[in-house]
Image (cartoon, rainbow, N blue to C red):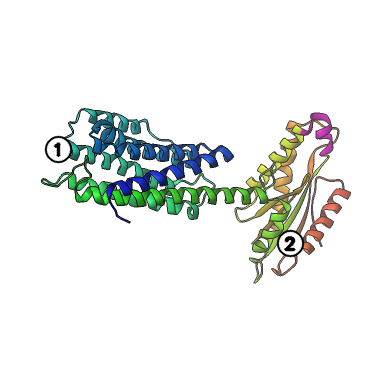
Amino acid sequence: MAFDAPTMMTLTIAIAAAAAIYLWIEWRIVRDDTLLFWSAGFVAITLGSTLATLRSDGLMLLGIWFADGLLVLAHWLFLRGVARFTGARLSRAWWLIVVLWLALIVVPPVAVGFKLILFMNSLLVGVLALRTSVLLGSSTETLLPDAGAAPLRYVFAVHGLFYLIKTIPTLVPGTLIDLATYRGTIIQVSLVEGVMAILLIALSMTGTVRYRREREIEHLAERDPLTALFNRRAFEARAERVMTGVGNGSRGALLLIDIDNFKPVNDLYGHAAGDRLLVELSELIRTVIPDNALAARLGGDEFAVILSGIGSECGLRLGHDLRERFHVLAAQAYATPEAVTLSIGLTVFDQSELALETLMHQSDTALYEAKRRGRNEVRASH
């Protein structure tokens, strides 16, 4: 295949159009505005590359200024999409890019004008691409971990650096830059890089979208939809990791937690109030337990927490803290014939190979004993 200008432009148009369609279809499915921004960016590249083919017909305004402006717009849309994706806020100063490019409309289409247009186009695209890369690498608010964002981040980093480097030849006297006929080494290199960059950006974006969708599906599959704690299946699958840290003098604890007199809350205040109480308890559990603990809603009003590195005294103290805080919270929010409290069954263990099923049975026995003794109690198994 010849690397001539028409071939490169055709490839760019085809790849950009395909990426725009794919991302638009994805947006129709998940309704994530990130995908809409990215799709619009590829639409801008498709239109800009199409208009660029008009240069040879003498249509300089459309073929150079407008076409290159659409390339800048595309990278601005990519940046907006990534900002939306990562939850970042962009300064209004980024709108100055539009003003800078509009000012170039008065530049005459001559050799010096070609250099100025290429300089500004390369500078603006490079800055936008590098800013996009930085956003992808600095966000901590997204469900997408670094493993999913890294390819797209590195592609934008290399792409941005290339465009910043491309500004240097425009400052060198005697460098041949003819945008009208695609003459000059820098122009030929740019055409090849353009095709490669669009292809890699498109593949990285589609891969990022797919990775994020998989992560979201995985997240939904292992989380309780009301409280966002782990569900029973995820708790059972992950408990072994916590238990393996127990042994060689270290101890662990399993707490089964059940709400006392939960039914009157639903009967007197409605199921929405009962749901709020479950959510409030889950938030309280998150507040009380250590970061390395595993918490789950097993179903209904029953919760479980498994911890490593604590003994009986610490486990009882944690259980009582949770019970007392919940008692205050529930008493302030819901007036019921009998107090809404917590009963907690606690099992402390020191053998990492001990089966989870055995621990659950022991804690359940202790929980039943706490209920039998009058509720609102933390009971340790023997």
Point out residue 112 in the picture as x, y percentages from the top left corner: 14, 37
Q: Mark number for residue 348?
A: 2
**Residue at 23% of width from left, 45% of height from top?**
182
Is residue 381 something one can see in this rendering? no
Q: 309 and 283: which one is in front? A: 283
Residue at the image point whose x is 66% and y is 55% from the top: 294
Crowd band around label 2 with a 10 angstrom C-alpha radius: few (<14), some (14–19), many (20+): many
The quarter in which the N terminus is drawn is: bottom left
User: Sequence-wise, which precedes: disc 2 or disc 1?
Assistant: 1
State whether residue 249 is above or below residue 381.
below
Nearer the viewer's eye, disc 2 or disc 1? 1
Amino acid at pointer 1? Val
Judge whether residue 263 is colored magenta: yes
Residue at numbered disc 1 = 112
Q: Residue at position x 32%, y 36% from top?
A: 51
Q: Quadrant of the C terminus?
A: bottom right
Which residue range is magenta in the image?
262-271
Mark 1 Cα shell of 10 Å, populated few (<14), some (14-19), many (≥20): some
